[in-house]
Structures are given as C-alpha cells and as structure tokens.
Amino acid sequence: QVQLVESGGGLVQPEGSLRLSCAASGSIFRIDPMGWYRRAPGKPRELVATITSGGNTNYADSVKGRFTISRDNAKNTVYLQMNSLKPEDTAVYYCNARILRLGYAWAEYWGQGTQVTVSS
C-alpha cells in the first residue's frame, strides 16, 4: 500500500509564511509528478503547484512568485514553501502523487489534507 502524509498546516497572519511537507511511503518504484492542490470553502479543488522528478515545476497564476514547490526524490517527499500569504489562500491543501509500484500500473494518490488558515 501507499500513503501520503502531510504536515505543516496551521493558522498564520497575512503576509506570513508556512511550509507544507508530504511524505510518500510504501512499496514505491517511481513518483512522477508530485504536487499540491487546495479546496477553499464553497469552491472546487484547484491545482496549486506540481513538480516532476526532473525538477520541472508548474504553478497556478494566483501563487506564482509567492509559493515554491520542491522535492527530495530520495525521501519521496514534496514541499510547498508559502510566502506572503493572503486570506484567499485559506483552504485545505492536499498532496497528490502519481506513483508506480512494482507489478502495478501507475496510480494517483491523495493525502488526507491539511488546513491552512490566513487571518489576522
């Protein structure tokens, strides 16, 4: 089995920073890509950022210049550094990974979600 475990959410003031982490565990052969999505109250889930095993990144326009995604391939971990946070960044953030297990086809996995609240 595969698990994605997120950490790092919380309450932060506007213009503050938070760092999210997501570690994948299990019988993993390859992960590509890894990324973060978010769902704000009353809104559909949206992509925040993704990163390939080669380091290619993709960001939502709303977070470009403020958020940075990175990954440690040896640890099967993806990070999201969030700076200059705004109240509209408030959402549940979900880790996402497309994973290949030995003997299985590629499959998509989701973390349980971590709450990020930006408020004064």
Image (cartoon, helix red, strand yellow):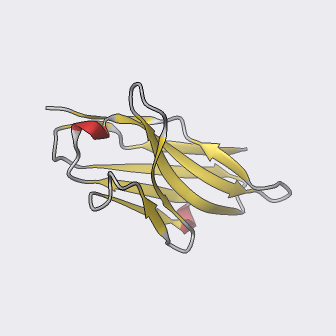
- Location of the C terminus (image quadrant): top left
Residue furthest right in the image: 103
Residue 26, percent across and down?
Answer: 68, 50
Residue 117, percent across and down?
Answer: 28, 33
Residue 54, percent across and down?
Answer: 55, 74
Above or below for 113 versus 28 = above
- The quarter of the picture where residue 42 lies is top left
Q: Residue at x 51, y 54 (%)?
A: 35
Q: Residue at x 64, y 45 (%)?
A: 109
Q: Residue at x 53, y 43 (%)?
A: 5
Residue 96, percent across and down?
Answer: 56, 48
Above or below for 119 versus 77 = above
Q: Would residue 74 be found to the left or right of residue 102 on screen?
A: left
Residue furthest left in the image: 120
- The quarter of the picture where residue 115 lies is top left
Above or below for 33 versus 37 = below
Q: Would residue 73 be found to the left or right of residue 27 on screen?
A: left
- Location of the N terminus (image quadrant): top right
